[in-house]
Image (cartoon, rainbow, N blue to C red):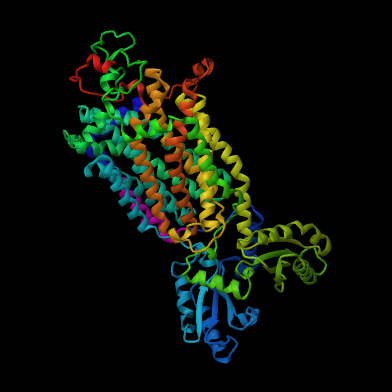
Amino acid sequence: MPAFLHRLGRLAFRRRRRMLALWLALVAAAVLCMTAFGGTGKLDNTFAIPGSESQRALDRMKTDFPTFSGTSAQIVFTATDGQKVTGPADSARIRAALDAAGSAPQVAKVVSPFDAHTISADGTTAVAQVRYEVPQSALEPNALDELKSAVAGANQQGMRVDVGGSAFGNAPSESHRSDIIGVGVALVILTLTFGSLLTAGIPVVTALFGVATAIFGALSLTGTVSISSTAQSLALMIGLAVGIDYALFIVSRHRFHLAHGMEPEESAALAVGTAGSAVVFAGLTVVIAMTGLTVVGIPYLTAMGLAAAGAVLIAVLVATTLLPAVLGFAGTRLTPGPGSRAMRREQAVGGAGEDAVGENVVSTTGDNVLSGTGDNVASGTGEIVASRTSQRVMSRAGEHVAGTAANAAERWFRLVTRRPLLTLVAVVASLGALAWPAHDMRLALPDNGTAPGSSSQRIAFDRVGEKLGPGFNGPLLVLADTSNSSDPTTAAQRVAATIGALPGVATVGKPVANPATQTALIQVIPDSAPSDPATKTLVNTIRDDRAAILRDTGATVQVTGSTAVSVDVAAKLDSALIPFAAVVIGLSLLLLLLVFRSLVVPLKAAAGFLLSIAATLGAVVGVFQLGHLGNLIGVDTTGPVSSFLPIILLAVLFGLAMDYEVFLVSRMRESYLRTGNPLGAVHSGARHSGRVVTAAALIMTSVFAAFLTSDSTMLKQIAFALAAGVLLDAFVIRMAFVPAVLALTRHAAWWLPKWLEQRLPDLDIEGDRLGPVHAVPESVPLTPSTAD
């Protein structure tokens, strides 16, 4: 792979105008396809599990009870100034509003509160139901706004009107502000990292190319496949974060080469061949993990996984093709200026023992330096197959050269490895404490109870729960098949009576029968809110009693409705979580075993990954379920964690954690193989990769955190979890846990049984066979002092 990427980087550099034109054409084609075939107006936010009980019942209701099969809205009328909705003036105003609502687009039926008896005991609140024959995703873009406008006439002195219900519960989220905030913060961090606005702008520009291609491409498919607004936002979030990070790794390596005198073309090719190999590996791990979400069998989650995987795959393609072309346009202008802080920093990194000077010295016995005649053999395609010198440094004395100041990352690693056992205990204890709330995590799909406090649907939700009971916000629908009963009408009534006697039931509606199909639909109002565990218990109780109901009435029953769908989705995800986690962790062990040819490194990575996942979930529970510091990010009410969050976090954080593991630990392994000094190798990895990994983690955290401004509770939770996960993984696991474990295990960290080593393929992620990673001009003198 490194040799292929080396040739690809050189080709893109030389044919930069054609490469840029190709990517511009790809973006334009994606925009045209989106305009012709898709668009944001066709996003589908429906939760469903094909084959589940709730979905089978909904499918049958489309023919048996079409007005109940779609989504629904609630119109909540609240009398003020001491009046009651049953008064003549108020009731007339309500009836006029309901007549107007019946004329709104796609409305199938409006159920008056006077007919359904959905009026609060104190007479101040009345709730009307608006039914549609289509799901929320099939509503016209202006359908809900038209409904609000239709009833706005009743919103006068003495009465307040709020519109909510499940039709509003999963509306598309806007993320334009998040894009701008994330890009702006990333640009600031990159400018501080490189000390150059031009260099900082390159990763941002190339990442935007990739994100535009991915998002417009995904939106072009919305006309034929179901893609949710959350899937679009997740792809945008991840594509932007990894796009900037992958470009950062390659540009950082390229700039290092330029600072040591390498020609821009060779520097770009070598950067793509070395750092680009790690980018491809890290990107593919994310793609594999995200694609693995398809096995769960939930279309909503499948779309999220494939959209994010596509965004990451395009980010990898951009980093290995468009980026070297842009580096070609920049030429030597990316070289740090002589005497500048950036130049001193690059030379300090290269001068600390494993710089190009040291790399070209044969050191074990002080032999003379071999000249590089004939050692650098290039193939006809420009592939470098040997280094400029015959061997790399094998210094036993360590790597830090006297007089060369350690950078901040190295100083930190020296601190945490001074007492590695103490560091390890502190990390495990602190992350364990942070993870503790996760043991009480409740999972459910988001509802209007967690919508922004000022929104109409949230006000309606709270008002209904307060005046009519929490169960009115999430009624259950029981579909009874009475075709095998001697008296279908009596059988339906007995089913309703049996369910009404169950614990946790507030009230049961009169069965609505369809004589043609011999089915009946029964509305069940729970005592508890839709996301309350007691409601889930009630759903399971009704399903568990189906055998007794069949024996007593001859009717078969199925429980459906938005609340039952949420229960089925949560159960499906819960059953898939452990197997998926086992696959992800097993994959990480295998991949890291191949890359680092070590037993300790993969086990350490798996342990660190589990710690960061547990701590992140604990932080999510603390903020969103327990309400700690939630007001800082706009969380004005507590509620359960989104059912999708744990499995999405596992998939995404796994791939992102592999980024930092590869870029940081590969430098340590490279140094250890040259010097045989395990502690010096740990410090060397910090010296060469610490600054870049830190910048990459800050960028990714900032991009994710920018999406906390979203009004979507699910997207806000995902953004918080990913931001916290990356922050913990990069700054606690990689910067403390990893060096502490490697310092404790010393030589054992890099040990692999001979029989296993001989059977494992050499992936050469860092491109060692391309030659020295840190190249220096041949004019640099190789003095005895630099060889020691």
Q: Is residue 643 left or right of residue 479?
A: left
What is the quadrant of residue 687 in the picture? top left
Residue 661 colored in magenta in the image: no
Residue 32 colored in magenta in the image: yes
The residue shown at (51%, 74%) is 163
Comparing 338 with 98, the one in front is: 338
Q: What segment carries the magenta color?
A: 25-43
Tally of numbered discs:
0
For the stretch drawn in magenta, what is the main secondary structure?
Answer: helix
Q: From where the camera sits, is residue 291 visible?
A: no
Image quadrant holding the C terminus, namely top left
Q: In this rendering, is residue 449 above or below 17?
A: below
Q: Outermost residue toward the left? A: 338
What is the quadrant of residue 710 in the picture? bottom left
Q: Is residue 544 left or right of residue 177?
A: right
The residue shown at (70%, 61%) is 538
Q: Position of residue 196 (x, y in %)?
A: 22, 42
Q: Position of residue 506 (x, y in %)?
A: 70, 70
Q: Is residue 6 left or right of residue 531?
A: left
The residue shown at (53%, 65%) is 448
Q: Position of residue 629 (x, y in %)?
A: 47, 57
Q: In this rendering, is residue 24 above or below 377?
A: below
Comparing 581 with 603, the one in front is: 603
Q: Position of residue 743 (x, y in %)?
A: 46, 27
Q: Is residue 50 left or right of residue 189?
A: right
Q: In this rendering, is residue 167 above or below 685?
A: below
Q: From where the camera sits, is residue 744 visible?
A: yes
Image quadrant holding the N terminus, namely top left
